[in-house]
Image (cartoon, helix red, strand yellow):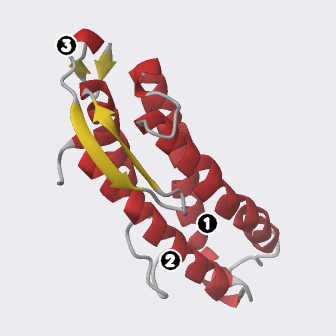
Amino acid sequence: MIVGGKSVRRDEAVLKKVSVSLPFGLGSAEWEADSTERYAAWSLYVELVTRISVQPLHEDEGILREALNSLYSLFKTTREILREAGPDVGASHNSVGGIAITVLNKGLRPFLTKWHSSLELWDTRRQNGVSPKEHEKQWLEESKMRSELEDLQKELNKYAQALAKISGVEN
């Protein structure tokens, strides 16, 4: 199996005991992660920390629509990483796959479901000659969404820390 560009065989996997705190009130998990899980965790970590998911979006920075698109793209990349890694990454609470799927469904999905349609409706009202940024600033929900995005980012930061620990880049 190829994970993170490296060939990994389950029978060659070295187990590493990990204990991680999970985001979104999911508690903690402890198990022995093998190299397949560590490579998948590293791939997920890279995707997460290079997006708005854990990078601050200050009040006068960025466009919320772009932030939503970036967060939404985590579904596709997570699916690809888990599919490539195969069933060895697992789907249980104590596995990289299980944690990743739960974070998508219990953490990201509610936020995206809430804000995608509201922002989309507002976007349809944008007048010609008004930039997307200017238009968002006029939206009454803009500051509330930014506040909830900040809360989401704090939880996703916990997820990133867990992935870093699982992958071995942080103790």
Question: In the rendered structure, which disc, 3 or 2, sits on the residue that comes first in sequence?
Answer: 3
Residue 152 picture location, percent across and down: 53, 69
Judging from the image, what secondary structure is the residue with disc 3 in?
helix
Neighbor class of circle 3 (other Cα within 10 Å; few <14, some 14-19, many 20+) is few
Q: Are marks 3 and 2 in contact (CB under 8 Å)?
A: no
Quarter of the view holding residue 144? bottom right
The residue singled out by tag 3 in the image is 12
Q: Which mark is residue 150?
A: 2
Q: Which mark is residue 21?
A: none
- Cα gap from disc 3 to disc 2, whole angstroms: 41 Å
Residue 60 in view here: yes
Q: Is residue 55 left or right of residue 101?
A: left
- Cα gap from disc 1 to disc 2, whole angstroms: 15 Å
Q: Are marks 3 and 1 in contact (CB under 8 Å)?
A: no
Residue at point 34% right, 33% down?
A: 40
Residue 16 picture location, percent across and down: 21, 34
Residue at point 66% right, 64% down?
A: 111
The residue singled out by tag 1 in the image is 65
Q: Quadrant of the C terminus?
A: bottom left
Q: Nearer the viewer, mark 3 or mark 1?
A: 3
Question: In the rendered structure, which disc, 1 or 2, sits on the residue that comes first in sequence?
Answer: 1
Judging from the image, what secondary structure is the residue with disc 1 in?
helix
Q: Is residue 27 left or right of residue 137?
A: left
